[in-house]
Amino acid sequence: MKEIQTVALIGLGGIGCSVARELCRAVGTENFRVLADGERRARLERDGVIINGEPCHFPIVSPNEPMEPADLVLVAVKFHALPQAIRDIRDQVGAHTIIIPLLNGISSERMLAEVYGWERVLYGLVRRAVIMEGNVCTYDPDGGMYYFGEAKNPVRSERVQSVCALFERAKLPYRVSADMVRELWVKYMGNISENQSAAILGIPYAAWYEDGNDANWIREAACREVIAVANRLGIDLGEADLVRQRARAKCTPAWGKPSTLQDIEAHRPTEVEMFSGELCRLGRELGVPTPINDLFYHMIRVLEQKNAGVFAELARSME
């Protein structure tokens, strides 16, 4: 088993911040790097980030800066930034580099493997409630879990063992699921239902603490569409997973806000294309109706257009 000595991270938002401090300490500042360019690099070098009240400055490098490839590359950008991130990590990837995406959705592993090969890509996902406001990251230090592994993990491969050893050194909570593809879909179901309904309605996790209320009816109707699409693809997702997701929502801090709601409130682009956009496309291909997610998709797109000033500009032009 090869020890991971150097780590590169692209994406210092909420999820990136939630691992950066601990991984930097585990491998040493000289062996940890954050990829950023232009104005973002200047801002990170000037202001750093504040993680649970602690000011942090990490080594920042430009994507095209010549250096030895990293042993591990973590991709923690938003989905709309993934195509550029795939290009930006090129010089960080060598023959034995491990790449783990920490994105929502079900597509990032495939997109990375299409460029760098499955021999370098592991599956990854995060379950942690994180609030990112400006350069300030806040999360429950005692909650959350990072998942990674091969598609199937009856035993842990050498590269999975290497990542496990690093996370143990960093004291980051992790889990290697027996079936990472199914694990992605379980989380996807939660993202589809919670991220999107929260963004549309402006509600925190507290809205789902009471079983059988209106917020849960909406959330679970969206869940059942994910289950139907997953089943058509041969993925073992069912009502028991919906019940577990119901309990999982109650374990998230009541004040927590799903990331899509945070994006809408901050007037940032959302990941709606990866959520209902992807699910509805699959539904059409497979002949599975997705009316709840069709509505979610168009409602969030309208919220994005509103944030961009489209309707205000249109109203002014008609005066």
Image (cartoon, rainbow, N blue to C red):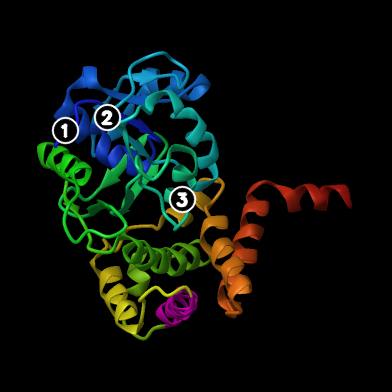
Residue displayed at 67% across by 53% down = 306
Pointer 1 with pointer 3, Cβ within 8 A: no
Q: CA distance from mark 1 to mark 3?
A: 25 Å
Label number found at residue 71: 2
Residue drawn at x 57%, y 56% is 273
Q: Residues within 10 Å of mark 1 (few under 14, many from 20)?
A: few
Residue 188 lies left or right of residue 263; in this view the side is left
Q: Find disc 3 in the rendering and name its residue.
A: 110
Q: Is residue 40 above or below residue 241?
A: above
Q: Residue at x 21, y 33 (%)?
A: 23
> In the rendered structure, which segment of residues is drawn in magenta?
214-232
Q: Is residue 52 magenta?
A: no
Left or right of 115 on screen, residue 254: left
Say which residue label 1 marks: 2
The mark nearer the N terminus, 1 or 3, is 1
Q: Element under label 2?
A: loop
Q: Earlier in the sequence, mark 2 or mark 3?
A: 2
Give the CA distance from mark 2 to mark 1. Answer: 9 Å
Q: Amino acid at mark 1?
A: Lys
Determine the image quadrant of residue 97. Answer: top left
